[in-house]
C-alpha cells in the first residue's frame, strides 16, 4: 500500500485527477487538498464536474489520470473497497434501499461486517438521537418517510461506522426550504461536533457560505478558485468568481 506517513488521518489529497466521458471532459487535470476536520464545499454551474469530483474522492469513479489519497493512503483498485468502507457517502434523497426498513438500511454495512448485534443497536439509537429521528420512524420503509427523514436516515447510514470522512452530493437539494434550512443547521452542528472531514456538493451559494470552511468554485471541468469565502470575496482570481458570488448570494 502506498502511504504518505505525514498526512493526518482524514486529509483528502487529489493530484492531477482528470476524467472524460467520450468527447466530454468532465474534469480537467486538477489538484485539491481538503483539510482534516473541516468542511469543503464544491460549487459551480450545472455540468461543471462537481459530482464527478466527489465521486472520484468516493472511489466510485476511477480517474483517467492522477491519484487520490485518503488519510495518506493512496486509493487503488486493490484497496478501494476497504477504503470506501471508511467513508460516509450521502446522496440526494438519502439513496436508501426501498425494500429495507430505515433501521435495516442503517444497519446494513455493520451487519455485513459482522459487528455484534448489541453494538449495532446501541449505535443506531445514538445516531437516531443525534439526527433527531424518532424510534418509530426507524421501522418504516423509505417511501413511508418524509424527504427530510429519508435524508436523516441516509446520514445515519453514512455515520454508522464512524468514518473520518463524510461526502455529501447535493444532500439537501430535494427538500422544501423550511426542512432544508432546519437540516442545514442540524448538519452543521453535527459536523462541528464530530470533527469530520466533510465534502459537500451544492448549487446554492448561501448553503456554500454557511457550511464551507473552504469553497471550491468550479467551471466547465476546472477548479477556478479554492479558499475561504472571505478570500474569494476579497481576492477573486478572475471576474467569474466575483460574478458568481454576487449573482448567487441573496442579500439577507
Ligand atoms: N456517465 C456519464 N456519461 C457521459 N457524460 C457524463 C457522465 N457523467 C457526467 N457526464 C458529463 O460530465 C460533465 C460533468 O458532469 P457532473 O455530473 O460531474 O457535473 P455537476 O457539476 O455535478 O452537474 P449538476 O450540478 O448538474 O449535477 C457534464 O457535461 C456531464 O454531462
Image (cartoon, rainbow, N blue to C red):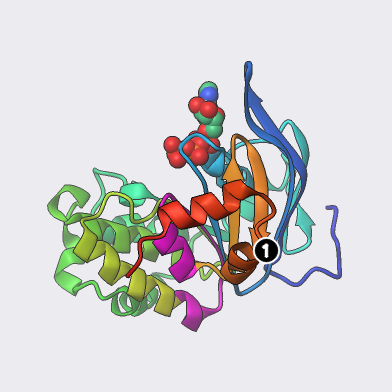
- Residue occupying the point 16% across, 47% down: 143
Q: Which residue is under mark 1?
A: 235
Where is residue 158? Give x, y as percent.
44, 61
- Residue occupying the point 72% across, 39% down: 77
Q: In the figure, is residue 60 to the left or right of 125?
A: right
Where is residue 67? Give x, y as percent.
78, 45
196 magenta-colored: yes
161 magenta-colored: no
Q: In the figure, is residue 67 to the left or right of 125?
A: right
- Residue occupying the point 73% across, 30% down: 64
Q: Is residue 169 depicted above or below 111 in this figure?
A: above
Q: Nearer the viewer, residue 114 or 195?
A: 195
Residue 133 appears in the picture as rendered? yes
- Residue occupying the point 49% across, 61% down: 114
Where is residue 98? Give x, y as percent.
25, 43
Which residue is situated farthest in the bottom direction here? 193
Q: Nearer the viewer, residue 195 or 163?
A: 195
Q: In the figure, is residue 81 to the left or right of 47?
A: right
Q: Quadrant of residue 38?
A: bottom right
Where is residue 41? Give x, y as percent.
54, 59
Which element carries disc 1, helix, strand or loop?
A: loop
Residue 90 appears in the picture as rendered? no
Q: Nearer the viewer, residue 160 or 181?
A: 181
Q: Quadrant of residue 250?
A: bottom left
Magenta residues (range): 191-211
Q: Is residue 22 depicted above or below 29 in this figure?
A: above
Amino acid at each position: 500500500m502506498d502511504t504518505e506517513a505525514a498526512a493526518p488521518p482524514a486529509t483528502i489529497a487529489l493530484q492531477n485527477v482528470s476524467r472524460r466521458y467520450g468527447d466530454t471532459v468532465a474534469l480537467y487535470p486538477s489538484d485539491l487538498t481538503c483539510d482534516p476536520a473541516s468542511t469543503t464545499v464544491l460549487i459551480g454551474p450545472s455540468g461543471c464536474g462537481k459530482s464527478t469530483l466527489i465521486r472520484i474522492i468516493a472511489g466510485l469513479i476511477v480517474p483517467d489520470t492522477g491519484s487520490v489519497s485518503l488519510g495518506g493512503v493512496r486509493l487503488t483498485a486493490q484497496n478501494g473497497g476497504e477504503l470506501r468502507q471508511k467513508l460516509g457517502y450521502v446522496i440526494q434523497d438519502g439513496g436508501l434501499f426501498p425494500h429495507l426498513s430505515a433501521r435495516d438500511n442503517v444497519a446494513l454495512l455493520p451487519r455485513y461486517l459482522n459487528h455484534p448485534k448489541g453494538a449495532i443497536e446501541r449505535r443506531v439509537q445514538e445516531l437516531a438521537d443525534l439526527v433527531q429521528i424518532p424510534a418509530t420512524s426507524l421501522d418504516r420503509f423509505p417511501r413511508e418517510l418524509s424527504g427530510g427523514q429519508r435524508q436523516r436516515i441516509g446520514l445515519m447510514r453514512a455515520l454508522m461506522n464512524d468514518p473520518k470522512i463524510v461526502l455529501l452530493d447535493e444532500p439537501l437539494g430535494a427538500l422544501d426550504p423550511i426542512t432544508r434550512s432546519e437540516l442545514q443547521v442540524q448538519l452543521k452542528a453535527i459536523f462541528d461536533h464530530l470533527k469530520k472531514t466533510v465534502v459537500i456538493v451544492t448549487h446554492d451559494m448561501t448553503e456554500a457560505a454557511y457550511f464551507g470552511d473552504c469553497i471550491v468554485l468550479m467551471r466547465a471541468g476546472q477548479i477556478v478558485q479554492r479558499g475561504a469565502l472571505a478570500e474569494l470575496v476579497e481576492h477573486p482570481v478572475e471576474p467569474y468568481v466575483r460574478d458568481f458570488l454576487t449573482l448567487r448570494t441573496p442579500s439577507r
